Amino acid sequence: MSNPAESLYNIRILDEFADKKSIIHDVHPLMKVLTTGAYLLVTVSFSNYELSGMLPLIFYPVIIMTLADIPMVPVFKRVLLALPLIIGIGLFNPIYDKSPMLVLPWITISGGWVSFFAILIKGFLTILAALILIATTGMTRIASALRTIRIPGVFIIQLLLTYRYIAVLVEEAGRVVRAYSLRSAGEKGIKFRDWGSLTGHLLIRSIERAQRVYRSMCCRGFTGEYHTGREKGIGIGDILYFAGWSLSFVIIRYFNIPEMIGWVMMGVRR
Amino acid sequence: MSHHIIQANNLKYKYPDGRQALNGVAFRITHGESVGIVGANGAGKSTLLMHLAGVLFPDEGEIRIGDVPVTKKTLPLIRQRVGMVFQDPDDQLFMTTVYDDVAFGPRNYKLPEEEVEKRVISSLNTVGILHLKDRPPYKLSGGEKRAAAIATVLAMNPDILVMDEPTSSLDPKSRRRLIRLLQSFTHTKIIATHDLDMVFELCERTIVLKDGRVITDGPTEKILCDAELMEECGLELPLGLQGCPVCGTKKPI
Ligand SMILES: Nc1ncnc2c1ncn2[C@@H]1O[C@H](COP(=O)(O)OP(=O)(O)O)[C@@H](O)[C@H]1O
Ligand SMILES: [Mg+2]
């Protein structure tokens, strides 16, 4: 926390990545939005017991991050921020579902554990995909892409302001916590009894700050539409990008590739 | 040019929590004037400026820019004429690059992208930070942020510049640079500040606020040299006018 600009809490780093140049960054935002949408759909459509089938899905984020020259570590770290939430969702599966699912010579894995890991992976992949979309496109261009497919302006403003607001909230939180720790005589963490007043304080500060930001936007003629300047039209390459990825996702969905590879290997051996 | 006249009549404003921040403020500022608005903390300076930019609307009284009253209906027009630089540049810089931030205003007015670019480049040039155009604003230094915030406003081509404590949190060198920059502008300038030395250099006219009222309004030299008046309003003489702390001699005015 001592250096907020470097810390985990600096979300704006994603926006900085969005200003890089690469083949992925060049793809039309709308196609990237649609591709991400398709990826999310396919990912969540896997049932919680198809652990092996969903493994190839990891290729999409890895390929994109490599091509877009986005460092993995900072992005992964930010996905981890949401991990407690996902773990919370899957936590009780291993307890409720004890039926054996995978019987290996040395260990028996229950269905509960399989579904727990499936939820974990699904959560991880969906959040990762969303962050990658932001990191390769930028929130403002995503917003204008949504505008072109006639998503009502109100929703888009909500999205943009919420996104901005998260950054504001996190920055204010950083300041409040720093001010607290400077006066708390070297203790680690925040004492439970101080939480109430700290969060209250944080809420008021961030609302006020968000209001000031909003005011200054209005002073420069912001009326609800966001304009991002020059945007190229959709080219054939953009469409191919979307089509290619969608096809791959569908293949991953309907064919259990790891299993097929397994068969092939066994066949070869036999 | 009559449309640059700013006329405030009996402005009253009460914050929702009941605090009467403006209590009958009236003045008239003509084209090209540079006016310092001074007063202690809580005197109502920021509140007054927000009325000028149409961020807040008075409970009573009215404000006119030229012949246009500031109301919700006339806002688009008002906001093109009045450029407001907020006290905290962090509130004003919210895009991912300095360029996009400066372009935000012109793009909202749906200018063609060539025109937007022209304006962005020229505004950044004016404030001297063209080389920072691709940097993320939150990584700039205090002085650079202030310059960027001013550029965002200049890009709107306003006739009137309204600034809330522009020199607060600037180091002496950045402050000096800012004052020179402001001196070079021909806009009508309204500057709320505690920095009386800046007012002395920059504004020929000063309005003193206290508890939401105008205490005096007149030529800067006369007002800022009035030790008694300054004391009464929670201010003090500009440093430049105070005696030398070492030898005690006063500077001639
Ligand atoms: N959002 C607000 N809600 C309630 N009272 C406010 C608010 N902002 C300012 N005030 C009060 O209004 C008065 C004038 O404030 P302000 O215009 O910010 O003064 P200045 O800028 O001269 O320091 C102060 O007493 C302040 O406490
Ligand atoms: Mg103020």
Image (cartoon, coloured by chain):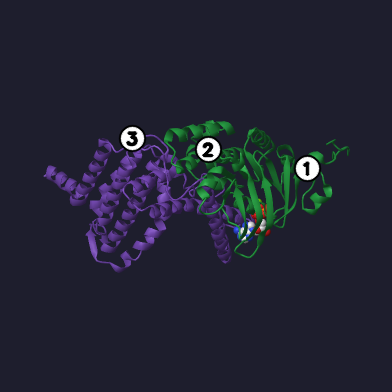
Chain colours: A purple, B green
Q: Chain of mark 1?
A: B
* Position of B137 relative to B229 (above/below): above
Identify the element where label 3 is drawn: helix
Disc 2 and disc 1 on one polypeptide chain: yes
Q: Which residue is mark 3?
A: A23
Asked if badges 1 and 3 are on one and the same chain, I answer: no
Q: Disc 3 and disc 2: Cα gap in Å?
A: 32 Å
Neighbours of disc 1 within 10 Å: few (<14), some (14-19), many (20+): some
Amino acid tagged 2: Ala
Identify the residue position indicated by label 2 in the image.
Answer: B155
Q: Is mark 1 within 8 Å of ligand 1?
A: no
Ligand 1 within 8 Å of disc 3? The answer is: no
Q: Residues within 10 Å of mark 2 (few under 14, many from 20)?
A: many
- Earlier along the polypeptide chain: callout 2 or callout 1? 2
How far from the left and from the top, in percent, is residue B183?
67, 34
Q: Quadrant of residue A121?
A: bottom left
Residue furthest left as drawn: A270
Which residue occupies the foreground of this view, A90 or A69? A69
Q: Secondary structure at mark 1?
A: loop
Look at label 3 and name its amino acid: Ile
In front of the other: A75 or B186: B186
Decide if residue A228 is on the left or right side of residue A201. left
Horizontal and vertical percent for residue A248? 22, 44
| Residue A88 falls left or right of residue A103 | right
Q: Based on the displayed image, in which of its 4 quarters is residue B247 positioned?
A: top right
Say whether residue A3 is visible: no
